[in-house]
Amino acid sequence: MSIKNKIVLNTEPNIYLIIVTYNPNDSLLTNISNMSVFVKEIVIVDNASSNKKILNKVRSLDSCNVTIIENIENLGLATALNQGIKYALQNKSEYIITLDQDSYFEQGSINVLYDRIVNLPDVALLGPDVINLYTKKRKYPKFKFDDGLYYLQACVMQSGAIYRSSVFEDTGLFEEKLFIYYIDDDFCKRLATNYKIAICNDAILYHEEGENGEKIYGGRKIFYRKYSSNAMYYISRNCIYMIKKYGVSESKRLFTELRNILLFQDNKIELFKSYSSGIKDGIIGKFGERHEM
């Protein structure tokens, strides 16, 4: 499939940066200040934050290229991203970057991503290398091809990735019924049928993956994520969605999270109940936001 975007060099990047927020802290202000000069517009989509202090500070910034979309309820990450994407498409964006509120780029990385994707017309989605702020480990291999890219046929994390805007018209938007978790996995699966997905090792994103834990097991240090019961529900439920849609090869995380619950997590009973509830709802096809009984 051909890319619809016309590549025009030596012009101001027509990039829209979308950040979904929920009770953000001051780091959002730093991110906006650091990135506003590299993009045409920053779109903040706020999912009904109870504390409006930071959003009010954003409004008072001198930068004139920030738009805020406020939701009156938490619509989930997928819907919020789609709101920002629709806004960017309506304003004729050529490229879109999505970013979590707890992520930030190494200086110059946005330019690197843009320069790469402009000159690689067969690549529709390009992600940076990702460094976990807790473990200091890179998400992707350190080696690279001659062109600085590590090609993937799997998933690129949506936070920090740059997309050709046209792919959303061809592939569709993020799957809103997933609410949160696996939205990037599902999108990449759909995208990879017609386009190339790649990682640029020369661009770096620092990403905070929530609260982490570590334990010694079998003489090895094991790092794991500490999830809330609500997060565990979405993970297990949406994993079932992926299995039903793409096959049993998507089942690995189900076993990984079950192992972590049984061996490492502290609130085992509560997490296991949510894990089981998520599997049940995934099987019967109950999606959207979780409404606990």
Image: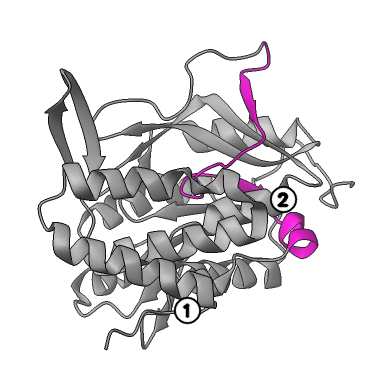
Which of the labelled discs sits on residue 191, or is there none?
2
In this rendered view, identify the residue nearer to me: 37 or 21: 21
Q: Is residue 65 visible?
A: no
Of mark 1 and mark 2, the one earlier in the sequence is 2
**Residue 240 coordinates in the image, percent (x, y):** 51, 61
Q: Is residue 89 above or below residue 193?
A: below
Q: Secondary structure at mark 1?
A: loop
| 177 left or right, relative to 19 | right
Q: Is residue 154 visible?
A: yes
Residue 168 lies in the magenta stretch:
yes
Residue at which label 1 appears: 288
Q: Tell me where the magenta segment starts and ends, as one range.
A: 146-171
Q: Is residue 252 above or below residue 76?
A: above
Per the model, the C-alpha gap separating discs 1 and 2 is: 22 Å
- In percent of the image, x 50 and y 45: which residue is there? 157
Amino acid on which disc 2 is placed: Leu
